[in-house]
């Protein structure tokens, strides 16, 4: 997947040396955040300077720790999987949750257990169906 194809879902990490790493969605960025060593070989977590998500409503970059995420909504991310729509404004996140289900929380509340079913439900269903045939 190319993040530029779905700019309202894009996320990124900026490193101390000015390098950037782009992600398809907030889910992928949060997985990275929880295990930098696994996803960024050769770069320690101390090299990370900032993490950013894109506001789904405005397409503006928002620092991850300032963003409001909607967990559990029916909104599918760029890979057509459950994801985490991100918003700079809590009221927009709440309005999205009213229309699409889910609940609003900040990135600091997203644990690996809450991330586990996100972004991977479609792949898991495909794996199961392949084994059943």
Image: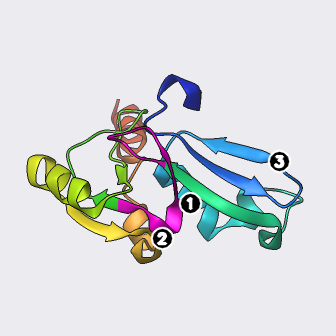
Dot 3 lies on which element? loop
Q: Which residue is mark 1?
A: 31
In which quadrant of the rendered image does the C terminus lie? top left
Closer to the chain start, of discs 2 and 3, is 3
Q: Quadrant of residue 81?
A: top left
In the image, is residue 116 above or below residue 13?
Answer: below
Residue shown at 35% from the left, 46% from the top: 121
In the image, is residue 25 above or below residue 17?
Answer: above
Q: Are marks 2 and 1 in contact (CB under 8 Å)?
A: yes
Residue shown at 72% from the left, 45% from the top: 21
Residue shown at 45% from the left, 74% from the top: 111
Residue 108 percent coordinates (x, y):
46, 76
Q: Which residue is mark 3?
A: 19
Is residue 65 one of those drawn in magenta? yes
Closer to the chain start, of discs 2 and 1, is 1
Circle 2: is it few (<14), some (14-19), or many (20+) Cα within 10 Å? few
State the extent of the magenta-drawn residues as a range.
54-68
């Amino acid at each position: 997947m190319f993040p530029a194809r779905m700019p309202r879902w894009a996320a990124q990490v900026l490193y101390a040396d000015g390098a950037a790493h782009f992600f398809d969605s907030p889910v992928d960025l949060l997985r990275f955040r929880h295990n930098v060593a696994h996803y960024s070989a050769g770069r320690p977590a101390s090299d990370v300077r900032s993490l950013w998500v894109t506001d789904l409503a405005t397409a503006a970059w928002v620092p991850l720790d300032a963003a409001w995420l909607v967990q559990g909504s029916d909104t599918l991310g760029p890979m057509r999987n459950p994801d985490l729509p991100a918003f700079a404004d809590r009221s927009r996140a709440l309005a999205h949750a009213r229309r699409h289900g889910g609940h609003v929380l900040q990135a600091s509340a997203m644990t690996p257990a809450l991330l586990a079913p996100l972004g991977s439900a479609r792949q898991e269903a495909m794996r199961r169906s392949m084994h059943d045939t």
